Amino acid sequence: MIGFAVVGLGMGRARAKQIVETAGAELNMVVDLNPELAQKVGEEFGVPWTISLKEALGRAEVQVVMVMTPSGLHAKIGVEVARAGKHVITTKPMDVSTAACDQLIGACDEAGVKLAVDYQSRYVDNNYRVAEALRLGWLGQPILGEVRFKWFRSQDYFRHGTGWRGTWAMDGGGSLANQGSHLLDLLLWFMGDPVRVYAETAIMNHQIETEDLGMAILNFPSGAKGTILGTTTFPASQYFSAEVHGSGGGVLIDAVLEGRMRVFGEGLEEKLNNIANPLHSVIEDMVSALEKGTPLRVDGREGRRTVALLENLYASAKEGRAVACR
Ligand SMILES: NC(=O)c1ccc[n+]([C@@H]2O[C@H](COP(=O)([O-])OP(=O)(O)OC[C@H]3O[C@@H](n4cnc5c(N)ncnc54)[C@H](O)[C@@H]3O)[C@@H](O)[C@H]2O)c1
């Protein structure tokens, strides 16, 4: 059994539940600065709770800490976890800057602990099949990768808690960095890192610092193109999709988090369906990495790629021109 603690119990509550439900994983403690919330979640899952991360880090049975606090605190807390000799999982995005990601990667390397970033759509069967098919060249020469979502977020959503959402310091951006980071991660997984991007962002219908609408055009080293569109201004949360095609076939993933897809190309669907995905969550992934030494699907360096892309997109939007990716 691998022992876990969860820090930050908004979305972290759902992850605590997932730990309880995962074979080989055990939830040993939950942590939140808000004592009522920590107590409520602790009692719900029948585990000790605390407002002190140090207390969790002092427990020998806690081997992995899942960091589910506002994004701008992931690296700071992760570094503390790593220095205590515990393995780290951060939720997405890894943090709000590549500098912070690098600090966390360095601290985990130094402490000899594992670091994973929770991009849940990487564990969805069909998304994994598409990534494998692209890696194996089954779609031919890549032509276009496209990700887009139209969601609704109220002004109250941004007022929630300490008001961290929609801020540069704690959310690292707006619809692209927060809701969209799952899709940015998929696009990088499918297509690789772009060499040049052009982005526009805008605040259309919320009182926030960061964008509620973002759009971008990407150029990949292969010559393939990419597009991103993400907004939280639609009247309802509708599609969250990824589409990719090459000279030999195409896939439309209509719902990325569920992995609903349509496949186009001679015999491609059957070939895709024969690909087996061995892992279904970051928790299973970490348990397997610790027990069997398997590589993590999204380690720190892999998780950092989305943050680097965001920095390039925001630099382009700020400068009002296409930029070469750093
Ligand atoms: N994977 C997903 O689909 C998904 C979904 C939602 C949110 N997230 C990510 O989860 C993170 C949190 O988002 P949320 O919506 O749950 O936020 P939230 O504000 O609802 O919850 C964050 C919790 O962290 C606690 N907290 C803050 N600082 C802390 C500290 N230093 N120590 C202990 N607890 C602390 C707060 O009291 C709060 O309860 C963000 O990084 C977000 O991007 C991921």
Image: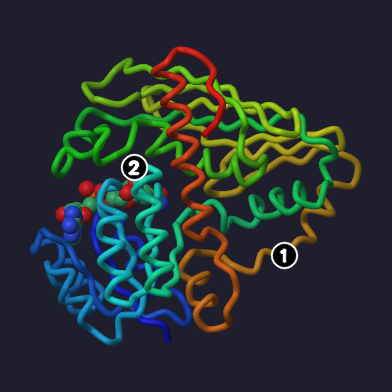
Amino acid tagged 2: Val
- Colour option used: rainbow
Disc 1 versus disc 2: distance between alpha carbons? 33 Å
Q: Which residue is drawn at 54% across and 30% down?
A: 148
Q: In this view, does 110 lie above or below 317?
A: below
- Which corner quadrant of the image does residue 214 belong to? top left
* Image-quadrant location for residue 252: top right
- Please give the name of the residue rendered at 31% of the width and 55% of the height, measured from the top-left corner: 75
Outermost left residue: 35
Q: Mark 1 points at which residue?
A: 276
Q: Circle 1 sits in a helix, a strand or a loop, which is it?
A: loop
Per the rendering, the mark at residue 96 is 2
Q: In this view, does 228 lie above or below 4?
A: above
Query: Measured from the top left, where is residue 190 in percent x and y?
Result: 66, 44
Q: Residues within 10 Å of mark 1 (few under 14, many from 20)?
A: few
Judged by depth in the image, the label closer to the viewer, 1 or 2, is 2
Tell which of 119 and 262 is nearer to you. 119
